[in-house]
Every structure is written in structure tokens, then in C-alpha cells.
Image (cartoon, rainbow, N blue to C red):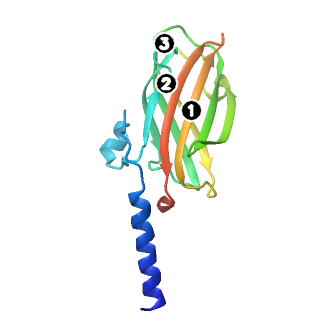
């Protein structure tokens, strides 16, 4: 066998072994955009409202753009929520990012420096765009966003899971 053929067989074997090792997760609350695009992957692009009714904003949709998330490009995360309580005039939110469960990034921001305030009752869309450096490692990511209002009361809680694949570059 030639070296080129041996190398090709080794690459195929690695791909088969690594794809067999991917966990098959039950995907809850998949974003309609991903479902319609047919790009939802079995190993866990999902989101959940972790506030369980104890926050002022109820999360009802999460959109990631582009989907799938790509390194070396801007990444926009949009949270569609409903504010059924009082007008939110200020507050802060903390974003924590984990790669395979290991904390890799944390940031706390003032709500009104990132979004127009006040947040009225009814449907409220919150969005943020950031650049994902080309050095971002591939893997399973978990993003948690927790917000508080001007009085320090919980206003939002979102758990978002997504994957950055080395084949998406």
C-alpha cells in the first residue's frame, strides 16, 4: 500500500470513530429557524428558559446567526422574550461561556449600554453581535445569560447549547 492510501484509510478510520463517539442528545425547544433549515444536529443545539417563571422576561425563542456558528465571522444571538410584568428601566446581565463544561469566558454588562431602555411590557427582542476569532476551538459550547433589573430582581435566564465544528470553517 502506498503512503497516500494508508493516510486516507487512517483519516476515514478517525472520522468513523469520532462520529460514533458523539453523544445523541434529546434536543428540546429547537429554534424553528434551525428546524426549517434542516441543520439541527443530533448532538445538542438547543436552548432553555432557565428562569422557570421566576424572571420578568419569559424566553420563547433563540436565534443564532449564522447557523451553524462559524469561527472568523460575526455571530449574532437574538433572544425573543415577553415582559408581562413592569417596565424594566435598567439592570445588568452576565454572560458565561463554557467549552465542554469548562468556563472559558465571562462578562457582565449594563443592560441599557447594550439595549435601548426602558424595556416595555409585551414582546421584547434582545440581541447582541460579537466576533468569533478564528482561533476559537471547535467543541460543544454552553452559554448562560442571567439578567437582573434595576432593583436587582431576576429579569432573564437563558441556557443555550451549540456546537462549533472544525468542518464549518
Residue 43: percent from left, percent from top:
40, 47
Q: Residue at x 36, y 50 (%)?
A: 39
Residue 131: percent from left, percent from top:
61, 48
Q: CA distance from mark 1 to mark 3?
A: 23 Å
Q: Eyeballing the image, is 84 above or below 63?
A: above
Residue under label 2? 50
Q: Nearer the viewer, mark 1 or mark 3?
A: 1
Q: Eyeballing the image, is 118 above or below 75?
A: above
First of labels 2, 1 by sequence position: 2
- CB-based contact (under 8 Å), mark 1 and mark 3: no
Q: Residue at x 46, y 15 (%)?
A: 53
Residue under label 3? 121
Q: CA distance from mark 2 to mark 3?
A: 20 Å
Q: CA distance from mark 2 to mark 1?
A: 9 Å
In this rendering, the count of numbered labels is 3
- CB-based contact (under 8 Å), mark 2 and mark 1: yes
Q: Residues within 10 Å of mark 2 (few under 14, many from 20)?
A: some
Q: Residue at x 57, y 42 (%)?
A: 101
Q: Eyeballing the image, is 76 above or below 120?
A: below
Residue 12: percent from left, percent from top:
41, 73
Residue under label 1? 144
Q: Left or right: where does residue 35 sit relative to residue 64? A: left
Residue 43 shows which numbered tag? none
Residue 135 occupies quadrant? bottom right
- CB-based contact (under 8 Å), mark 2 and mark 3: no
Q: Between residue 65 and residue 102, name the one nearer to us.
A: 102
Residue 118 occupies quadrant? top right
Helix, strand or loop at label 3? It is loop
Helix, strand or loop at label 2? It is loop
Helix, strand or loop at label 1? It is strand
Amino acid at each position: 500500500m502506498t503512503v497516500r492510501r494508508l493516510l486516507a484509510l487512517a483519516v476515514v478510520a478517525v472520522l468513523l470513530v469520532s462520529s460514533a463517539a458523539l453523544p445523541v442528545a434529546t434536543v428540546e425547544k429547537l429554534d424553528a429557524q434551525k428546524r426549517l433549515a434542516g441543520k439541527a444536529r443530533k448532538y445538542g443545539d438547543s436552548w432553555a428558559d432557565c428562569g422557570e417563571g421566576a424572571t420578568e422576561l419569559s424566553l420563547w425563542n433563540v436565534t443564532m446567526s449564522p447557523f451553524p456558528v462559524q469561527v472568523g465571522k460575526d455571530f449574532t444571538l437574538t433572544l425573543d422574550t415577553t415582559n408581562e410584568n413592569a417596565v424594566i428601566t435598567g439592570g445588568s446581565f452576565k454572560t458565561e461561556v463554557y467549552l465542554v463544561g469548562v468556563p472559558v469566558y465571562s462578562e457582565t454588562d449594563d443592560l441599557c449600554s447594550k439595549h435601548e431602555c426602558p424595556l416595555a411590557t409585551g414582546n421584547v427582542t434582545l440581541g447582541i453581535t460579537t466576533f468569533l476569532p478564528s482561533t476559537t476551538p471547535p467543541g460543544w459550547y454552553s452559554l448562560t445569560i442571567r439578567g437582573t433589573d434595576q432593583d436587582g430582581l431576576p429579569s432573564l435566564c437563558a441556557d443555550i447549547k451549540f456546537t462549533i465544528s472544525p468542518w464549518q470553517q
